[in-house]
Amino acid sequence: MATQRRSVLKSLFASILGVTGISAAAKAAGNSAPEKEVKNVTDFQGVPLFSGSTTYNGLVFIAGKGAHFDGDVKAHTDHVLKELEKELIKAGSSMEKVLKVNVYLNDIADYKAMNEVYIGRFGKNPPVRTTVAVAKGGVPGDSLVEIDCIAYK
């Protein structure tokens, strides 16, 4: 067991050093690391709290979107997916380029209804997805669903 753990740690350190070496070589060649592009920053008491979207090295990270109006989980899911799509387009991506989705449900009993609206929204090759029901207090802002995603440009 200890030998296996050392082997895994050696592999991990080798990969980290390899990435660091590639980064150092790129900088030495005059290439700097790609800049992180942040959009739609939300402030709290004048201090940046989080970004609505961030792009880095060809990837697009979209913050969780919720629906803050009266309605059922189907209406909320439709609204949230439309908001995700708008953010993806603004960032130079699309629903078809989404790689990973996280779905947070206020109530796991809404899973089937959420899926009825979700199905087909990401094209023929849907992204991997994790769906969880949130604990005490529910999804922020009384939304019945919140969804975030990672895509490529």
Image (spheres, helix red, strand yellow):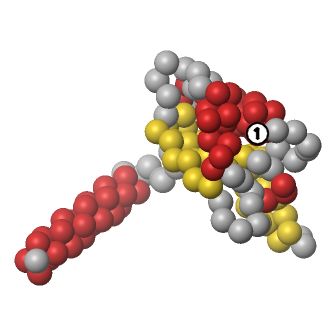
Up/down of 7 relative to 19, above or below: below
Residue 67 picture quarter: top right
The image quadrant where one finds the C terminus is top right
Which residue does the image show at 76% across and 33% down from the upper left? Answer: 74
* Residue 101 pos. (x, y %): 56, 42
Residue that appears at 61% across and 46% down: 103
Give percent across and percent down for residue 123: 55, 20
In the figure, is residue 111 to the left or right of 69? left
Residue 129 image point, x, y percent: 50, 42
Q: How many marks?
A: 1
Taking depth in this image into account, of 44 and 145 the one nearest to the observer is: 145
Considering every residue shown, the one lying at the far left of the view is 3
Quarter placement of the N terminus = bottom left
- Extreme residue toward the bottom, this view: 2
Query: Which amino acid, mark 1?
Result: Val
Q: Please give the residue where the numbered disc 1 appears in the rendered image.
A: 73
Camera-side residue: 25 or 12? Answer: 12
Helix, strand or loop at disc 1? helix
Please name the residue shown 79% across and 59% down the image.
140
Q: Name the residue: 76% across, 39% down.
A: 73
In the rendered structure, the answer to whether residue 66 lies left or right of residue 8 reads right
Q: Is residue 83 above or below residue 6?
A: above
| Horizontal side, residue 12 vs residue 77: left or right | left
Residue density around tag 1, few if under 14, some if 14–19, many if 20 or more, within 10 Å = many
- Name the residue at the top extreme: 124
Q: Nearer the viewer, residue 1 or 59?
A: 1
Q: Is residue 36 visible?
A: no
Which x, y percent locates residue 120? 58, 21
